[in-house]
Structure formats: structure tokens, C-alpha cells
Amino acid sequence: MDTLNILLMGFISIVLINNLVFTKFLGICPYLGVSGRIDMAFGMGMAVTFVVTLSGTLTWLIDHLILMGTPLEVTRYVCFILVIAGAVQLVEMYVRKFFPSLYESFGIFLPLITTNCAILGLCLFINLWEIDNLLEAVVLSFGAGIGFTMAICIMAGIRENLNLADVPECLKGAPITLITAGLLTLAFMGFAGMIR
Amino acid sequence: MTLADVYQLWNSAWPAGATMLGLGSGFAVVLLIASEKLKVQVDPKIEQIHEALPQIDCGACGFAGCTSYAKAVAGKPALIGKCAPGGSETAGKIAEILNLQVSESGPAQRPIVHCRAHTEDKTYYGRYQGILTCTAANALPTVQACKFGCLGYGDCVSACKFDALHIIDDLATVDYEKCTGCTACSKACPRNLIEMVPFRHENVMTVACSNKETGKATRSMCKVGCIACGICAKQTDLFSVEDNSARLDYEKYQPNEQTETAFNKCPTCVIVYRGPSAPPPRQPKQKPAAKTTTA
């Protein structure tokens, strides 16, 4: 019961309170780049969720089984990026095969998941927070993906409605998007401090 | 570095290398299996078309790059001939791949700079010391007197992928030997001075000015500006005067006696030839006969 409690708390924490996009400002590039339409945003969120879950788990394993045993912790970044790049390649092949239209509309943003800092950030946070339980690492990674999906979908929903709104000429396009992102972040600051 | 140092370095480095190698090969195997399982059949024609294209991703066709153009053209053959750098040769190759006959394509489009004022012809109100791009300089209206002429900071030069544009004495000058007609420069110019023009002949005549002010105002700020006197329009219908600036109808342009007379009679010598073997422009006299008209 205790373990379940910790896992649940960890999940809620990474989705709402320590959301990587809203509180750590990671992964802003696809957050603003692909949030034009809600279906694309959801696809992107799913792709990131898959990559982050896979790489979060794998990097925890690699970190604990290989790197920490030997004095190789300096190579952590390189190894993590290797894992992430591999996972992204996998996702790219999968999306290309089964969702060709989604593949077309993602364009450069799909391979750019490799450089999505939310993913490397999460892998390093898991290390920083000293998570020493594989299950916790998996839940945290998955939660980070869900948090990203939530953030990008909220953003896409707002932006779809913004297209119909009467925005002042000088704020059209990027400025209003950035203002919206800032307001969203402010709103999510309300969760701060709920769980440590 | 002694031998012991090298030995120590090797001792501390090899586990890292071995780990990376191990991880890398592990992922390589996984990805290899995945790429076999998730193989996508790509139309071999798209691949062939892509190889026939110049592969410079200039964007003249209106697509993001050669890859997307190849895909589009394979699905919609009407798009053949959009590749300006490749020209008719590439169009022919694509048509061959798609088993089509390509019809006679239009003449090649080449850029013409609608300004011929070099440093000594222009008037400056001050010295510009800002960011050295035309876009930045264009925001300050008072440095160069002429609001329409070439600024000479070379936005078009940096847009050109073929080294076909150079700033010579503050004037963008096209090297027609190297130009492929990709339209990048005409999009880059903040003053829209560069126009894509059909080159039906080796050299094309043009009115190298786009100043829309009255003849008197133009004369006061530029030695070689078009003063809209209308002498060229009297010679032949190909020239017309609109908005205080003469213009040549490039679609109908044919070199003949009348255009030659117009070339020779232009008081400010703003009618010039452009092309790979263009004859040099006439130089205005020190004090050309001031003949201003209001249009």
C-alpha cells in the first residue's frame, strides 16, 4: 500500500505539479511548434510519451546496472542521448509505417524529439532525485510523457480557439501564443507545493 | 607524456569505450530488426526523380525542398518544370521517368535589378552605421536619399546559393553566367527591386529604376534615375510610363530599331541591357539636358 501511495504521488507530481513543460520549461520547442492542431498535438504527445517511457526506463537500468558499478558516470549524458536517439528512430519507423499522414505533418519535429530537452531532462532528473526503484522510474517517465501530452493538448485546444478570436493585429501569431503559454504556466503554478 | 601516462589514460578510457560500443551495437541490432519489420515501400520513381533534381533545396518550386518536390511531382505530373535551377533539362528527365512527353516550356526566368545607381550616382543624407543588411537599412528611410534604389548591403547576395550576385559599388549586380533563376534574390530584397523576367533573348533591355517620385525629385537624388520623360514611350509601344517610372513590357520585348533608339535617346541613360553578354550602359553626360515632365 505504501509503495502504491508513493507511485501515485509521484505520478500526480510529475503530471501536474512538476510538469516538465510548465514548471521546468523543458520541451518548449515542440510545445510551441506542433501545438497548432489538436490531433497533431496529441500524436506528438503520444510519440513523446513512448520515447520518454522507454528511454526513462532504459536509462535507469543502464545507469544503475552499468554506469554506477563502474566509474563511468561521466558518460551518462552520452549514453542517455544514445538511448533517446535509438528510441526516436524506433518511433519514426513506426509512425511512418502506420500513420503516414501524421508522419508528413510532423515533418522535422519527429526526428527533433531526439533533442527534446524534456526527455533528456527527465532521465537526468530521475538520477538527480535519486530514484532507486525501477517501478518508480517507469511511473515517473510515463507520467512525464502524460504531462507533456496534457500540456501540448491544452495549448493546441487554446490555439485552435485563438484562430477564431479577435486578436489585436500586433499580437497575432507568435506573440499571443507566447502570452498564452505564460498564462498557462501561471495557472499551473497554483499546484506548486501541494506535494513535495 | 610518458608511457605510464598513456597506459593510465588507456586504462581509464577503455571501459567507457567498451560500454558505448556495447550499447551502440545493442541498439543497432534492435533498430535493424525494426527497420526490416517496419519497412515502408517507397515508389522507386520518387527516388529516381529526386536523383534527377539538382538537390540544392532552393525552394524555387514552392516546396520545402527537393524531396518534397519529388514526391509532389510523382503524384501530380502537371508540376513538371517548376524546378528553375534544373531548367528544361531536369524537366525532360522527370518526364522520362514518368513516361511523359514534356511540352515546350516557357523561356527561362532571370532576375533583373531595377536600379543602376552606383556609389557616385547616389545621394546620401548621412552615413549608415547600423546593422549591415538591407532589411535593417531599409527601416531607416533617411540615410539613402532614394527610397526605391538598391541599398547595397547584399541581402540578395547572401540569399544566392550560386555566387551569382555581387555588390559592385553599392549596386547588386547579377552574374548571368552563374544564375539559375531560382528566385531567391527577388524574395530577399526588402525593396522588391529584383524582378524575375523572361529572357527570350540573350540580353534583355530594361529600365533600371523603380523610383516613383516626380522627375524633378528623382533628378535631385540620383544621376541615373528614371525621370519619366516619356521619350522611350514615344519610340515604341513596348515602353509605358506609369507612376513616374518607365517600364518595359518584357512579355512582348523584341530587340528592334525603336528600342535601340529609345536606348540611345534616354536622357539619364537608365535604359540598359542585362544579360550574360550585355553591352555596357551609356554613361550620362556631366550635365544632361534637364528635361523634366510631370506625369
Image: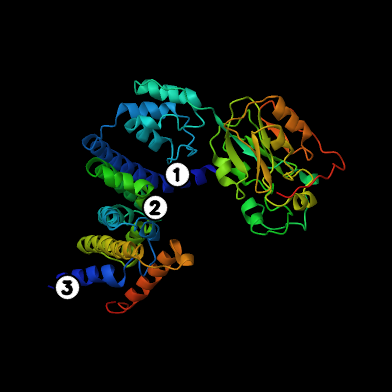
Judge from the rendering whether residue B246 lies leftward or rightward of residue A109; answer left or right.
right
Identify residue for label 3.
Answer: A5
Cα distance between the residues tagged 2 and 3: 33 Å
Cα distance between the residues tagged 1 and 3: 47 Å
Name the amino acid, label 2.
Answer: Thr
Mark 1 and mark 2 in contact (Cβ < 8 Å)? no
Identify the residue at image location x=48%, y=24%: B88
- Dot 2, crowdedness within 10 Å: few (<14), some or many (≥20)? some
List x then y, in percent, for residue B237: 65, 33
Q: Quadrant of residue B288?
A: top right
Mark in the foreground, 2 or 3: 2
Chain for numbered disc 1: B
Chain for numbered disc 3: A
Identify residue for label 1.
Answer: B10
List x then y, in percent, for residue B240: 65, 39
Q: Earlier in the sequence, mark 2 or mark 3?
A: 3
Q: Secondary structure at mark 1?
A: helix
Question: Which numbered dot is residue A115?
Answer: 2
List x then y, in percent, for residue B252: 59, 30
